[in-house]
Image (cartoon, rainbow, N blue to C red):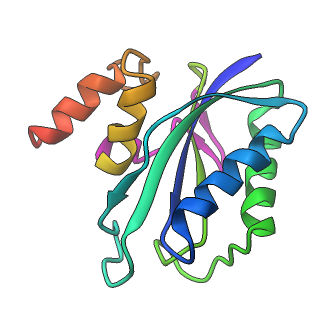
Amino acid sequence: MANVYLGLGSNLGDRKENLEKSIAALNNFEDIQVKKRSSILETEPYGKTDQPEFMNMCVEIETRMSPLSLLETVLGIEHSLGRVREEVWGPRIIDIDILLYEDLELELDDLSIPHKEMHLRSFVLEPLSEIAPNVKHPTLGRQVIELKEDLERGE
């Protein structure tokens, strides 16, 4: 079983319900078990700012799925909840990102592990530091809590 951390976000419809439905959908897969979940954080939009505020959170899962199978699974969950990809950083019913997958470093056309920008996003590091403060970013060699503190200091 691999330990994996996911970031979840929603800024359309019933945002909290969208997050809860996503977690329930993850748990419905035999090869996924949600182990921990952060609190929900309300945040300003990132990148494209003229849209509603987000609710963000992180979850820790254990899975037997490969990274690509997990990507297919989370994209399927997004689709089943009504996500339509129209623009980069645009509004969305649900967004599920694979942040960390064990200590794997992977760079493919449609999947980067660790997530390329997680260390630059307080809406990821804040909830992730609740559930995984001591987990190390495999590329940067820094713990999640250190990355959060670096970002808060503007480093």
Residue 27 appears in which quarter of the rendering?
Answer: top right
The image shows residue 35, relative to residue 118, as above or below, that is above
Taking the view exactly as shown, the residue that stands out farthest to the left is 153
The image shows residue 49, relative to residue 9, as above or below, that is below
The question of residue 116 being in magenta is answered with yes
The residue range painted magenta reads 105-120
Rendering coords of residue 57 (x, y %): 47, 46
Q: Nearer the viewer, residue 34 or 136?
A: 34
Taking the view exactly as shown, the residue that stands out farthest to the right is 30
Q: Residue at x 76, y 43 (%)?
A: 26
Residue 124 located left or right of residue 64: left
The image shows residue 91, relative to residue 103, as above or below, that is below
The image shows residue 107, relative to residue 75, as above or below, that is above
The question of residue 7 being in magenta is answered with no
Q: Quadrant of the N terminus?
A: top right
Q: Residue at x 64, y 48 (%)?
A: 111
Residue 110 located left or right of residue 116: right
Residue 152 in view (yes/no): yes
Residue 127 located left or right of residue 103: left
Q: Residue at x 35, y 50 (%)?
A: 123
Q: Looking at the image, how many numbered discs can be counted on the residues?
A: 0
Rendering coords of residue 65 (x, y %): 82, 31
Residue 95 in view (yes/no): no
Rendering coords of residue 80 (x, y %): 81, 66
Residue 117 located left or right of residue 70: left
